[in-house]
Amino acid sequence: MQNLSQVLAASATPESLQSVLNITISTCVDISNALKKGSLAGILGMAGNENVQGEEQKKLDVISNDMLKDALLACPAVRAIASEEEDDIVPAHTDGEYLIAFDPLDGSSNIDINAMVGTIFSLYRQTGDNPATEQDFLIQGKEQVAAGYVLYGPSSMLVLTTGKGVNMFTLDPDTHTFLLTRENVQVAQDTQEFAINMSNQRFWADSMQNYVNNLVAGKNGSRNKDFNMRWVAAMVGDVHRILCRGGIFIYPWDNKDPSKPGKLRLMYEANPMAMLLEQAGGKAHTHTQRILDIQPEAIHQRVAVILGAANEVDKCLSY
Ligand SMILES: O=P(O)(O)OC[C@H]1O[C@](O)(COP(=O)(O)O)[C@@H](O)[C@@H]1O
Ligand SMILES: [Mg+2]
Ligand SMILES: [Mg+2]
């Protein structure tokens, strides 16, 4: 079985990009080890502060953010980082080539129930003579040179694209290396499984309510087929299921809080997952446009997300 380094070398990934990916992913191995200790290491529970988006931080949000931040700032190829848990971007090396945006721990509400969480990352190549600024990060998702996540589940898995398809790797706990276990992942065009937080239904637009009502109506409605529903409450877990067995994932626009046009973050969640889905033959849109075409206006910007099986995303958008 090929390991991550062999796969990156075989696909002619530039050495500088390999170095940033290796640092990111080896830090995820450390996060995976920390998660395994859970309560024994006293790392569960609340940190007692809020992030810049007004969300209560868990201890593990802070710990995983600090681990990734320290490791990446020490990497000479890194120009700057942006994190869901940092107020501002953090410049690293002016002559570094890569900007990296990450969600250090996705699905934080799952931590205390010992359910799936993950780390999501997104890389852009950019050089300049001055220290990076927030403006430098406001690049369309289609410019990403690599994106992926590490899912901390029953086994820890890395899912990665460098723009040449999607590969899945499984962490070998004996050697602490990621081994290639699924190559060139493809998502089926059609599906009978959807993921959405139904408790928000009354806040959705009428069109989304109609679409989901028709899924729930199954064979008795206009779709003429029954649908199953799943909700991991960690985007990383829901996207992983879709990459493994298909489906559609939706975190739609809602009117719960007029200041937020969606819950998920463009730079740390929507863009990297959109690149993975498109690389696997699926689609990723907001209710109005392709996610990878969005011109970001701020690093912590939120967007509506509809991603997964291509025909089902089209069907949803047709409402
Ligand atoms: O509370 P809800 O509606 O189940 O939200 C779940 C969504 O929120 C998130 O957990 C947000 O991510 P963070 O844990 O990184 O804030 C997504 O991963 C997930 O899809
Ligand atoms: Mg998240
Ligand atoms: Mg998070």
Image (spheres, grey):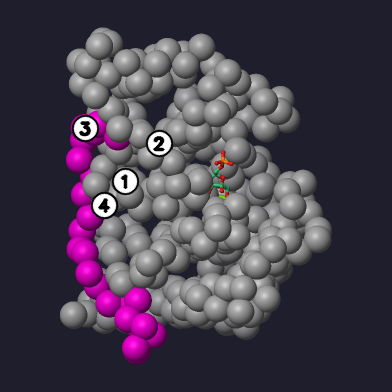
Mark seen at residue 244? 4
Q: How many marks?
A: 4
Percent of width and height locating residue 46:
73, 61
Q: Are marks 3 and 4 in contact (CB under 8 Å)?
A: no
Start and end of the magenta stretch? 171-193
Q: Are marks 2 and 1 in contact (CB under 8 Å)?
A: yes
Horizontally, residue 70 falls left or right of residue 11, namely right
Residue pictured at 27% horizontal, 77% vertical? 179
Q: Residues within 10 Å of mark 1 (few under 14, many from 20)?
A: many
Horizontally, residue 312 falls left or right of residue 71, namely left
Residue pictured at 20% horizontal, 58% vertical? 184
Mark seen at residue 195? 2
Percent of width and height locating residue 165:
26, 57
Q: Earlier in the sequence, mark 3 or mark 2?
A: 3
In this view, 142 is above or below 290: below
Q: Depth check: 293 or 37 in front?
A: 37
Q: Are marks 1 and 3 in contact (CB under 8 Å)?
A: no
Percent of width and height locating residue 81:
63, 65
Q: Main secondary structure of the magenta part?
A: loop
